Amino acid sequence: MKSSKRSKRALISVFNKRGLLPFAKGLVRLGFEIVATKGTARTLKKKDIPVKTVSEITGLKEILGGRVKTLHPAIFGGILALRNRKHLKELIREDIKPIGLVVINLYPFKNLEGMDIGGAALIRAVIKNYQNVGVVIDPEDYKKILDELKKRKGNLSLKSKKNLAKKALAYILKYDRMVYEYLTSHRPQVTGFRFPEELFLDYEKAQELRYGENPHQRAALYQMQNAKCPSLRSGYLEVSSEVSREKSRGKMQNWKQLWGKKLSFNNILDLDVASNIVREFKEPTAVIIKHTNPCGVARDRSLTRAYQKARACDSLSAFGGVVGLNRKVNTSTAMEITSTFIEAVIAPGFTPQVLKVLKKKKNLRVIKITDHRSPITDHQKDMRTVDWGLLVQDRDTEDIEIKELKVVTRRSPTKEEIKALLFNWKVVKYIKSNAIVVGNKTEALGIGAGQTSRIDAVKIAISKMQTHISHLTSHIPLVLASDGFFPFQDSIDEAAKARVSAIIQPGGSIRDKEVIAACNEHNIAMVFTRIRHFRH
């Protein structure tokens, strides 16, 4: 086999030698000079593949029983050098040849004695200089790498090198996690498992899913790679590249507890929903959450009035709930909050005087949030564990504008009704399916959540509304929002009895025509969004 005078250099050090021989032969045919660690070199020499050992390049033999092999400037200088005049001149002066490709996989980790040091360092070095050096850690990639090298005269594209670097980084992250688990012994015990200070989960994508909770949300199923890692059975877990975490005391930088007992698992779930709902609105808005469902949402120029209206929606359920506000809390609002039993309140700020009022309730958790104005982005994902693995989907950030509403009835909604429809459409997105909200343009008046039939959700929402309907005037439009389509007209008939004048829903039922006809019969305006907001 002949190699060119100006051959490129490839470093090979692999524990898993599957597919190695044809790959190495292919590299030699393309003019690569191969340098390998002792065990890999021995395998190649048996098949007469030209190879130099690392010791021949460094001038030093492997020492300490193989603990030190590649850790030498002749190797790492060849990988880390930028391909500019300054670095290349320095390599010539030191008699070091650039390395353009590193083919490597690590010893399986069993204990610290078998921990791979040099291999992990080589991968990190390539990642740092991925624009100039390619790294291959998976035998499954050998064929496509050879094919690209043939097409590109011995070079890999920048895109390929970046993708290979990302794959290699994931590879050593998994390896490092196994070492961490070994050192900390965080394994399930007979009596359960201790909670580590840092939790590293190792999942691999098993399959892309048709969609998430709703068609506009992408989703995938991931499965845990290491059976020793404790399985978590939580609900939603938000992951965001936008939010950094403080290591001290486990606090997140985007919120801070100012008062009250330690937060519980359920408190955090409810606070998450509360803060996300009020972020939907520009006006002063209040929400009360119970068991991750809003039991009252309202907006008003006055934050105090907004809270009062939110509580009035279902004052019985509001008892022991979690309050979310999107404005700095004033004293009058604080007094309203402390007038009944509330578990926690989350808001952008609290004055010293307000805190003095709230601290009269020793068990009330007071949480200040700092990112209440930042939008939810595509970087953030919803995750939920199941026995099969980890479900991951896009956050449901889809919104709708007036121009996107499709009027399907003879009567179009009035301007006041449209405002009410859009307000309640934002609310229904955060209610467990089947979900119905009856309300006006500033407040939810009745909420039906988590029902197995839509008609039951409608009846519950109307029933809750009718407990405090007396304070409303007849000229204020009453509307209904549904997170999914109506399968039958029975829900429309119930809405008509409650004097609902407009309805917003996704549409898409095989009985849409019957539902539209029922609305026309009752003189109810209805619009389709063509977007649903299921929340399981």
Image: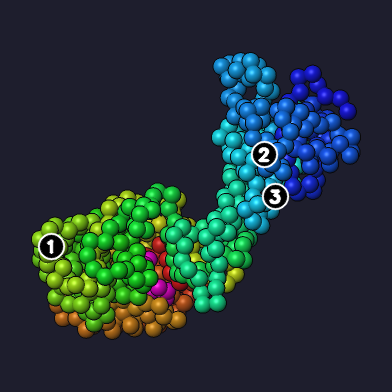
Q: Secondary structure at mark 1?
A: helix
Q: Quadrant of the N terminus?
A: top right
Question: Looking at the picture, which amino acid does disc 1 mark?
Answer: Val
Q: CA distance from mark 1 to mark 2?
A: 63 Å
Q: Which residues are magenta?
A: 429-436
Image location (x, y in percent) of residue 420: 26, 65
Residue 449 picture quarter: bottom left
Regarding mark 3 in the picture, which secondary structure is present there?
loop
Q: Quadrant of residue 62?
A: top right
Closer mark to the observer between disc 3 and disc 1: 3
SS at badge 2: loop
Q: Badge 1: how crowded within 10 Å, few (<14), some, or many (20+)?
A: some
Q: Main secondary structure of the magenta part?
A: loop
Residue bearing mark 3: 107
| Residue 228 place in picture, x, y as percent | 60, 66
Which numbered disc, 3 or 2, marks the residue that appears first in the sequence?
2
Side of 272 relative to 298 (left or right): right
Residue at x 70% of width, y 28% of height: 58
Instruction: Name the residue tied to disc 2.
Output: 68
Quadrant where the image shows the C terminus: bottom left
Residue at horizontal 76 percent and vertical 35 percent from the top: 36
